[in-house]
Image (cartoon, rainbow, N blue to C red):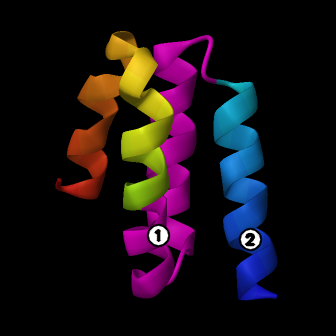
Amino acid sequence: MARAMFEYTKTVLSKVSFDSALFSKELQKAVKRLLPAELEELRIWLTSFIAGKPELSECLIYLKV
């Protein structure tokens, strides 16, 4: 079940990446509901996902990168 939440989180973040405020809000929700190991995976995924989207780079503060 937890793995499904991680995949769902990636899907949601991908779909809301057009709006940095909404992306930040969804990322904050993800940090509250994912397991610590999943947060590390999310951090890795996010760094590659936002590589071409500089407007989203400020959202990494929620993961304490």
Decide: few, some or many residues near mark 1? Use Cα within 10 Å; few <14, some 14-19, many ≥20. few
Q: Give SS at disc 1.
A: helix
Residue 11 circle label: none
Q: What secondary structure predominates along the stretch shown in magenta?
A: helix
Instruction: Depth check: give the residue in front, 41 or 62.
Output: 41
Q: Is residue 21 magenta?
A: yes
Give the labeled residue for mark 2.
5
Amino acid at the residue labelled 2: Met
Q: Residue at x 82, y 88 (%)?
A: 1
Q: Is residue 45 magenta?
A: no
Residue 41 circle label: 1
Q: Residue at x 81, y 75 (%)?
A: 4
Instruction: Depth check: give the residue in front, 45 or 25.
Output: 45
Q: Which residues are magenta?
A: 17-42
Q: Earlier in the sequence, mark 2 or mark 1?
A: 2
At which x and y percent is residue 48?
43, 41
At which x and y percent is residue 45?
49, 53
Q: Give SS at disc 2.
A: helix
Q: Residue at x 47, y 18 (%)?
A: 21
Q: Is residue 26 above or below residue 36?
A: above
In terms of image quadrants, where is residue 12? top right
